[in-house]
Image (cartoon, grey):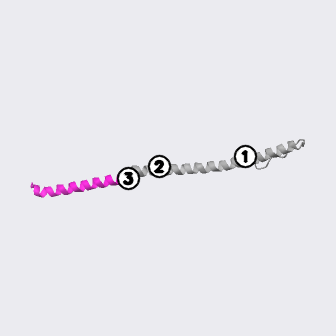
Amino acid sequence: MDWAQIGPGIIVATIGFGGAWMTSKIQNKGRPENALIDQLQEELTRQGGRIDGLEVEQRKAKRREMIRDNYINKLREHINAGNPPPPPEWPEGLYD
């Protein structure tokens, strides 16, 4: 066997293998980072939904508090005016 005939084939094969190896390394490089970004985006979406739910509950709680405060004021006015029982009607919409 003459190295002049085999050498170029080995060199071409080595270059081809090296190119394939480098390509796979470059393609796989971003995968862990992309996976982390995807996980963080999913977490942000979940947190956004949770915050939306909490904001709805907070609005409901503020509304109930306002209705209760108004009823307390009515009761106090009723008592201060010297009115006998029964007290003013229970407010509507308190537990809707």
Question: Is 32 placed above or below 8 here?
Answer: above
Type of amino acid at the residue the image marks with label 2 = Gln
- Lower position in the chain sequence, tag 3 or tag 1: 3
**Depth-wise, is mark 3 or mark 1 nearer the camera?**
1
Instruction: Name the dominant secondary structure of the magenta segment.
Output: helix
Type of amino acid at the residue the image marks with label 3 = Gly
Inspect the magenta stretch and tell me whether residue 88 lies in it: no
Q: Position of residue 62 (x, y in %)?
A: 70, 48
Q: Secondary structure at mark 3?
A: loop
- Magenta-tinted stretch: 1-28
Mark 2 → mark 1, Cα distance in angstroms: 39 Å
Q: Determine crowd level at label 1: few under 14, some 14-19, many 20+ residues with C-alpha closer than 10 A.
A: few
Q: Secondary structure at mark 2?
A: helix
What residue sits right under mark 3 in the picture? 30
Q: Left of 81 or right of it: where is 5?
A: left
Q: Position of residue 71 (x, y in %)?
A: 79, 46
